[in-house]
Image (cartoon, rainbow, N blue to C red):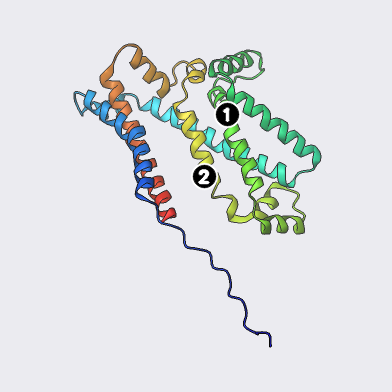
Amino acid sequence: RPSSARAPASVEPPASAPSRWTIAAASLIWIVSIGAPLALFASALERWGSIPRVLSLDRDAWWSSLGVASIAGGAAVLIALASWQALVAGGRATRRVAIVSIGLLTLAGLAPGVLIGSAIARLGTLAPIDLAGVAPSLAHLARFGFVAALAGCWLAATEPAHARDIRAIDGVSTPRRWLGAVGPWALAPLAPVALVVALLAFHEIETAVLLTPPGRGNLARKLLDQLHFQRTEELSAACIVLGIASLALATPILAWALRKRS
């Protein structure tokens, strides 16, 4: 007589906790990339009062660089969304244009920053409108837009099956309807894209030196001037602020990664 008992359902094994070597390796990367430079700059600082003084004197450069980085990060989200939608919801011609555009952005990302800056500066002299105000942001997108475009490719390749089915059933034809079909799942991966591109734009120096208009502050150019004129006190103070900001970003990410593996 055949047994009527059902076969036990397969149970996935629980995720293994991170080993000591994994924690040590992750901590070592964190210490070498952030902790060691921060300690070196702190040892070169003669007066801790230089930190608030640098922030006060160079606040225009800090705010200007943050503004340009924010624009680049916001535009990166649009590039990722456009690449994603074109690859999964567009027609054949749209997908071909998207693939070519992604390839061109990748090639631009491999080009030296001096060439990108010179090309945009030349474009500014030929354009019928003044591009001085947006030239740094355009240069950052030309250099780092490929990060957002490749992120859009990854999002298209890993889109959940249920979101793809809903989009096909609803016949999504506009970006707004498409974003509504994919749901909140689309928003979570876009935050790291914006953060990465914004951080790359914040510290980029080659095009910033060429394209920042006179009279507008730029942190990368300010740091380059301090290095050139050997103003080690101001340079160390500014780098300590950058190191502390890096700690504020890296510590939660490291804790989240270790907790996810546990």
Q: Secondary structure at mark 2?
A: helix
Judge from the rendering whether residue 168 lies leftward or rightward of residue 191; answer left or right. right
Instruction: Where is residue 171? Give x, y as percent.
Output: 77, 55
Q: Secondary structure at mark 1?
A: helix
| Lower sequence index among marks 2 and 1 | 1
Q: Quadrant of the N terminus?
A: bottom right
The residue lying toward the viewer, choosing from 19 and 109, is 19
Q: Residues within 10 Å of mark 2 (few under 14, many from 20)?
A: some
Residue matched to label 2: 191
Q: Quadrant of residue 124?
A: top right
- Amino acid residing under circle 1: Leu
Instruction: Where is residue 84? Give x, y as percent.
Output: 66, 43
Residue matched to label 1: 141
**Residue at the image point whose x is 52% and y is 18% from the top:** 211
Instruction: Where is residue 111? Give x, y as percent.
Output: 59, 20
Q: Quadrant of the C terminus?
A: bottom left
**Residue at the image point whose x is 23% and y is 26% from the top:** 50
Q: Quadrant of residue 31?
A: top left
Looking at the image, the residue that sits furthest to the left is 47
Height in image: 229 above or below 44?
A: above
Height in image: 119 above or below 73?
A: above
Instruction: Where is residue 105? Give x, y as percent.
Output: 64, 28
- Amino acid residing under circle 2: Ala
Q: Quadrant of residue 152?
A: top right
Label 2, label 1: how far apart the Cα atoms are: 17 Å
